[in-house]
Amino acid sequence: TNSFGGTRYRLKLHNMQDRVVELNRAAARNARAVADAADHTVLVAGSMGPTGELLVPMGNMTYDECREAFAEQARGLVEGGVDILWVETMSDLAEVKAAVEGARSVAPDLPICATMSYDTRGRTMMGVTGAQMVQQLAALGLTAVGANCGNNLIDTEAALAEMHAAAPDMLLIAKANAGMPRYEGDKLIYDGTPDVMAAYADRVRGNGISLIGGCCGSGPAHIRMMRQVLDGAIPVPEVTLVPAQPAPEAAPARTRERRVRRG
């Protein structure tokens, strides 16, 4: 669903914080209508992205406020008919847990998945490793966990490998960006071609990942070629990945607001 920024904290930026349930319900209904028109089974996942706020003591948002914000969003998504609640592009484990608790309070029987965004050095912006993620979320009874978005394929795949090593029996998700964005004139271009994403899909499946997709920059052409490679309909493209430049060891807390972006 197109509800990534659907909590009241994000909608407040547009003076729409009092329309959380309405807007999330509409997002879910739009996706539900398209899914139901398909000639095969299509599941609708309700996207729940980060609030953009820092939890106490680093910020002003309490855990209870965070949990209630996600419960409110989940209420609209459930009313709109989603099949799954999908918590994504997280960097803070406490926010993941609050989101899961909020979602489950509204829809105790719906599957819930959660993914975090890994930057260079295999950690989220808040310092969480892949192993820490699966170890700390194991008790929440999630349907699947994994990585989405992130700086580049190499580091996202490294985080996923760490998850698989730490929890080999856990169902894992790989949903990487189609490269990194850059401007060409007035157009934003992602450098991850369908060939690059198809090769990535084959690699992560070989490393034990079961749920494979694309995040920012991924379009129908990317998903189509990924599916063809995974089905064995076409050979795996030969591509070369170029490592990204290392990120700084730490970023100021204020950068979190700017980076609750992609997803």
Image (tube, rainbow, N blue to C red):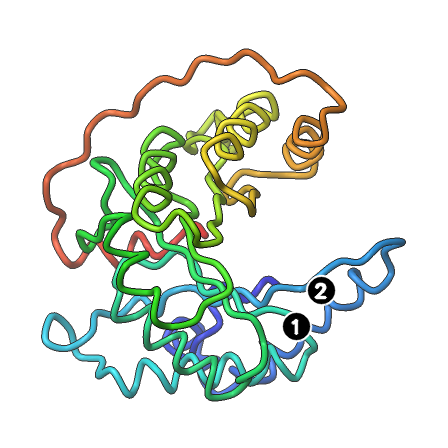
* Residue designated by label 2: 31
Earlier along the polypeptide chain: callout 2 or callout 1? 2
Q: CA distance from mark 2 to mark 1?
A: 8 Å
Residue pictured at 57% horizontal, 38% vertical: 218
Q: Quadrant of residue 195?
A: top right
- Residue type, mark 1 in image: Val
Side of 61 relative to 208 (left or right): left
Camera-nearest residue between 56 and 261: 56
* 91 relative to 228, above or below: below
Provide residue 259's location: percent of width, then percent of height: 31, 52
Residue pictured at 35% horizontal, 83% vertical: 67
* 207 relative to 23, above or below: above
* 230 relative to 88, above or below: above
Q: Secondary structure at mark 1?
A: loop
- Residue type, mark 2 in image: Ala
Whether tag 2 and tag 1 are in contact, CB under 8 A, the answer is yes
Camera-nearest residue between 97 and 209: 209
Q: Quadrant of the N terminus?
A: bottom right
Q: Quadrant of residue 258?
A: bottom left
* Residue designated by label 1: 82
Provide residue 69's location: percent of width, then percent of height: 39, 82
Near mark 1 (Cα within 10 A), the count class, few <14, some 14-19 or many ≥20, is many
Q: Secondary structure at mark 2?
A: helix
Q: Quadrant of residue 132?
A: bottom left
Camera-nearest residue between 184 and 47: 47
Camera-nearest residue between 169 and 24: 169
Provide residue 20's location: percent of width, then percent of height: 51, 82
